[in-house]
Structure formats: C-alpha cells, structure tokens
Image (spheres, grey):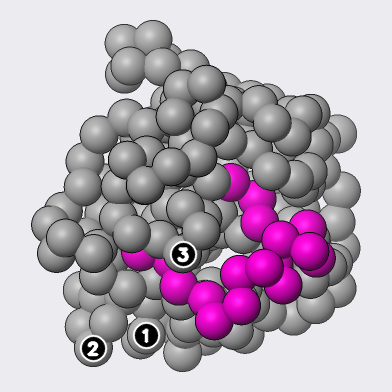
Amino acid sequence: MTTRVGIVRFPGSCDERDAAYAVGLVGGEPQLLWHGDADLAGVDAVIVPGGFAYGDYLRAGALARFAPIMGAVAAFAGDGGPVLGICNGFQVLCEAGLLPGALTRNANLRFVHRWLPVRVEAHTPWSAGVQPGSVLSLPVKHGEGRYVHPQPHRLVEAGQVWLCYAQPDGSLDAAANPNGSTAAIAGVTNAAGNVTGLMPHPEHAVDPLLGGTDGPALLAPAAAATAPAG
C-alpha cells in the first residue's frame, strides 16, 4: 500500500509543491494539508516544507508553531509518526519544541544559496537506507540557517545529529560550514528518532536538470514508512 505523506501548507510556504513532486517520484502519495485544519487526514508521514510561514514575522517559525495543524503534528510525532522539517519546516519544528536547538541568522548575516556537501551521521526513518559517513550533495537557501545548541556533544552522544556540512571527502572544517552552525550541524532528530529536520533541500535534488539527484536518499523511506494515522 502506498504511503500517504501529508505536506503542511502555511501562508508563506513556497516549497510544498516541490516536496509533493519529490514524494511522488519516490513512490509516495502526497497530500497537501492546510495549516488551519486540526487533523492530518489519516496520513502516514508528515513533511513541514520550506518557505516563510506567516512571513517569518517575529522570527522564523515562531508564529507557525501555534497553527491548529501543529497540535495534530505534535500528537502524531508523540505516537511515533515520522515527521520531516525542511528549512523553514526545521525552524517550525524547533520553535514547536519537537526538535532540540534553534535556528538563527547566518553568522555572516547574508543569505546562502548554493549546493553543498553534507555528511550523513545517523539513520532516521527518512534515510534508513543511507549509511552513516555517506556524503550527499544538496542545495541550501536560507538566511536563518545557523543551528545553535548549548550542548552539541550531548546530541552527538545521543545519536541525534543527522547531517553535518562537510567537504566533498566528508571531512569537517570551518570552510565547509556555510552559516556558522554549531558543530557544523545541518540536521538533527528528536530523542526518539522519528522527528527530523534539516536545512538543505532534498526535494530540490531529484532531477539532473536541477543540479543533482541525491535528494531521494533522504525521502525514499517515505514510500515505505508505516506510522499511526493522524
């Protein structure tokens, strides 16, 4: 049975159609979910996509966390359902307390928009087929993508660091970190491992004409995920 993947649409979302297209490419059945609804329409997995939810007023994700749909997302996540936040979606999940840490302005205060290597650090429901240590090429486009956490070593010890910005050979250094993120972190998970977030955009890396095809490696499990209905 095809997995139904709900994609939350907020006022200001701009990547929900890209996410839906990418989900379809990997065999999932995308379904757009409106921010004002209070249930998830029985989907099997949830993506909170990129964009500028509620115009990023106050700060990115700060208003979206109060949307009616987020109560359903939190309950779904609490039941073990797989949730993925991409870029602005990552910011929303952090603001909602579903992921540790926070996203702040890039260290150089400039918008970053380019393809970058990222190293996979851990398995998640969205990347179960990717071995830790693998290096993927993904695009980023953000002005508030600097991940901060007071104790990054705790995240590493707990296996909650999902992705790190890296050199093409997988090595980590300051030159590979595009935004000043703590410990070069590009993606994290919650303690249970079912909620994940990342700043790069796998949904934009699904076609050679777009610049690369590594994105499905972080989306393909959506086609086979099983989770409680929301």
126 left or right of 148 in image: right
Q: Quadrant of residue 129?
A: top right
Image quadrant containing the C terminus: bottom right
Where 206 sits versus 84, above or below? above
Mark 1, residue position: 62
Image quadrant containing the N terminus: top right
Mark 2, residue position: 58
Q: Label 1 amino acid?
A: Ala
Q: Label 3 amino acid?
A: Thr
Q: Residues within 10 Å of mark 1 (few under 14, many from 20)?
A: some
Task: Give the mark nearer the N terminus: 2 vs 3.
Answer: 2
- Identify the element where label 2 is drawn: loop
Confirm or deny contact between disc 2 and disc 3 (CB under 8 A): no
**Horizontal and vertical percent position of residue 127:** 72, 38
Where 102 sits versus 23, above or below? below
Residue at (80% x, 77% y) in the render: 78
Residue 130 falls within the magenta-colored stretch: no
